[in-house]
Amino acid sequence: MLFDVNKCMWSAPILNALELDEKVLSRPVPAGHMVGRVTDRAADEVGLNHDTVVVAGGHDQCCGALGVGVTGSGIAAYSIGTVECVTPAFDTCVLNETMRQSNFATYPYTIEGL
C-alpha cells in the first residue's frame, strides 16, 4: 500500500514513516511505456532478437479488461477466475468511504489517464 494512486507515485509520507528509501523500489511508469531493452546475453539465452524492448505491463484484471474493449471511462468488463471481478474504467480516481468499506481496489488503468 505504498503507492499513491492519485499521484501515480510512491507515497512520501508512508515511505518516511517506514524509513524506506524510494530508491529500493521500482520506478513507477504507466502501462505500455518502454522501460529498457533486453540485454544481449539475455536475448541469446532465450532466443530473442537483440533489439527486443521491455515494456511496462499492468494489473491482470486491467489488462484483461483492455483486451475485451474497455477503452474509455464508463465502460466495464466482468470476469471470473480466482476472483469474480467487475473492472470499470473512470477518468477520475474514485476513492471514498464506501469504496474502502467495500474493499474495492482502485489503481491506474492500462490506458494512461484512466
Image: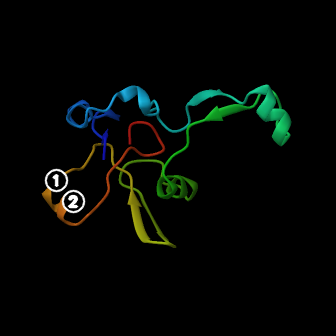
Q: Are marks 1 and 2 in contact (CB under 8 Å)?
A: yes
Could you say where residue 23 lies in the image, as x and y percent from the top left?
41, 26
Reading the image, the residue beneath label 2 is: 99
Between the residue at mark 1 and the residue at mark 2, the CA separation in whole angstroms equals: 5 Å
The image shows residue 27, relative to residue 86, as above or below, that is above
At x 20%, y 33%, the residue is 13
Using a 10 Å C-alpha cutoff, classify the residue at mark 1 as few (fewer than 14 neighbours), some (14 to 19) or many (20 or more). Answer: few
Q: Amino acid at mark 1?
A: Asn
**Numbered tag placed on residue 75 in the rendering:** none
At x 51%, y 39%, the residue is 31
Could you say where residue 33 lies in the image, as x and y percent from the top left?
55, 31
Reading the image, the residue beneath label 1 is: 96
| Badge 1 element | loop
Q: Is residue 18 left or right of residue 97?
A: right
Report the label total.
2
| Badge 2 element | helix
Could you say where residue 64 lies in the image, as x and y percent from the top left?
54, 58
